[in-house]
Amino acid sequence: MPNRTTSSRILKIILLIGIVLVAQPAVAQKRDQFHIDYTVAVASTEAHLFHVTADVQNISEPRLELSLPTWTPGWYTVENYFKNILRFAVTDSKGARLQPMMTRKQTWLVDTKGLNRIKVEFDYRADVLALNQAKITNDLAFFTGTELFLMAANHRKTPSTVRFATPAGWRIVSALKQTDATTFTAPDYDTLVDSPTEMGNFDVTEFEVEKKPHYLVTSPAGAFSKDKAAKFVEMLAKVAEADSAVFGGLPYEKYVYFYFFARAESNAAGALEHNNSFVAFAPPGQYATPEMIVGTASHEFFHLWNVKRIRPAEMWPYDYSRENETPLLWVSEGFTNYYGNVALYRAGLNTRQQFLESVAGAMSQVEGNEARAYISPANSSASTWVGYDTPVAFGISYYTQGQNLGALLDLSIIHDSAGASRLDDVMRALYRDFYQKGKGFTTEDMIVIINRLTKHDYHDFYRKYVWGVEEPAYETILGYAGYTVKKSGQKTFTIGLSIENTPDGPMIGRVFRSSPAARVGLRTGDQLVSIDGYDLKTDLPKGLARLEERIGQSVRLAFKRDGKGQEVDLPVDIQNEAGYRLVENLNPTPEQLKVREAWLKVGK
């Protein structure tokens, strides 16, 4: 068990590594009102410890409830961050210990009768670099507010100040508003916990969009070359301008893109949106190119509006103590998938043909999955907490389902409104009528907006394709724009794993349940060496071609686990894959041309 000797040793470590802390500045709230000042110190790089202090002042209630979130919005898994806390202690203004009562997991009730001020201190073990976790190394510290900051019940809208204490020479970049070198502020608790912060050694490329500062933060330092960064920020700026045009401006004072060119240390990989930033993992810098990673960036940037502001009613406000189930993630994520491709097209980063291929690709993915005949987009959304970052035995992606329906709704609205409206207008209405009025939206709210814009009733569309599992009327809806849907079926191979490129060669990024890879015991992190003697590090395409040749049979797979070489006979299963193509009609009608040009219009 930790004791006072351990705490003293940590304090010495803080002093030895040279903490930089400045005097307290003025903050934006009245000092005679309830407020919390936080200090986050990198207490030990060796033990991976933050030391967090919450100075709670001007308390007026006899009992104060404090809680820590159990999950991070956008990553729908309960993590129970309390499991990483050590030495949680509460004292009064004279330093006397108070004994809080735990009323629920991660919730403390403090007797504050007669007390105006208390201080809460704890250490937080940060040893996992992932989208929804925290990490401290010898030259880096990263966290998101959900992991470290306590919420005081009934004070959710109270502003707060955060001061950072870091080893000498470390830099600090945060999505929070900066007031000086080490001090940042948040207008309310939700902003506070939705703001990632990185400290240490990294590269920063600053640029402007619509006269607002934007920061590309890349780690580790030197992993993403200056030439690549310069090209990437040009692309990011174009995406931001394309999305801004939809909503009439950018809803923030600054924006931060956090990129780690490394492998995530949990299943929380990929990218995650925040209030005015996002965090992403990408292949090591020598493998990543701006063209390779801009698609993810486009998706995450549109989340600024869709889910961070335009939010399902079940998530307004967030309940950080438990799962927040909603049937609308097909909109929050699926429409964002669709608009990720729309923005790339409107920004001139993708061609018209590439955009059309993205529409057809979503159709292929949805219709090629047997589960789509059993699981509706709404039900897939509501059940996400069961297997968000661990695949379920039988499921379908509401990302792809929603992307597919987003395109179909866009075309239907254009057609039914005779070109006067499109999905952009639905998104603007949701932003104006719900987010800007401080509330979330429901499925019925969406239908009402679409019905108003089109003068048609869309309840049947939602009954069939959102709550139901009927196959959408692709021929009819794509036909509005003069496209014919061509469908083909093909047999392809599946082994049930995803592959990531690393400096040591291809590595398993994920193993899917009940797959051939799972049946033979392959694991995430295994380094792939060869398939039937084909060296996968030097010629991965030939290895994959071998899988095509051996469909219905097995291949000899060599791999390394913990540096030790192993071999298995890996079955190569057959997978029937539906394929869709959009073919442009040679003689479209004037009405079809009008819909097509409205759908594929670039600019005003």
Image (spheres, rainbow, N blue to C red):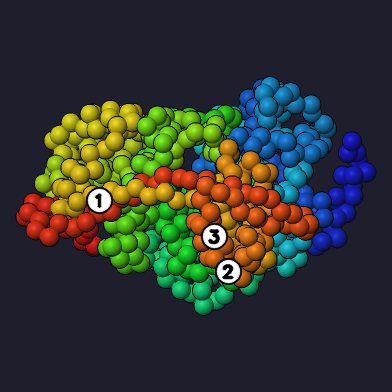
Q: Position of residue 183 (x, y in %)?
A: 63, 56
Disc 3 or 2, which lies upstream in sequence? 2
Give the farthest residue toward the left. Answer: 590
440 relative to 361, above or below: above
Does dot 1 land on a helix, a strand or a loop? strand
Determine which residue is flagged by label 1.
486
Per the model, the C-alpha gap separating discs 3 and 1 is: 29 Å
Mark 3 burial class by Cα count in 10 Å: few <14, some 14-19, many 20+ = some
Q: Who comes first in sequence, dot 3 or dot 1?
A: 1
The residue where tag 2 is placed is: 539
Q: Is label 3 in a helix, a strand or a loop?
A: helix
Residue bearing mark 3 = 546
- Mark 1 closeness class: few <14, some 14–19, many ≥20 residues within 10 Å: few
The residue type indicated by label 1 comes to Lys
Please say if the residues under marks 3 and 1 sit with CB atoms less than 8 Å apart.
no
Name which residue lies at 22% across and 39% down: 473
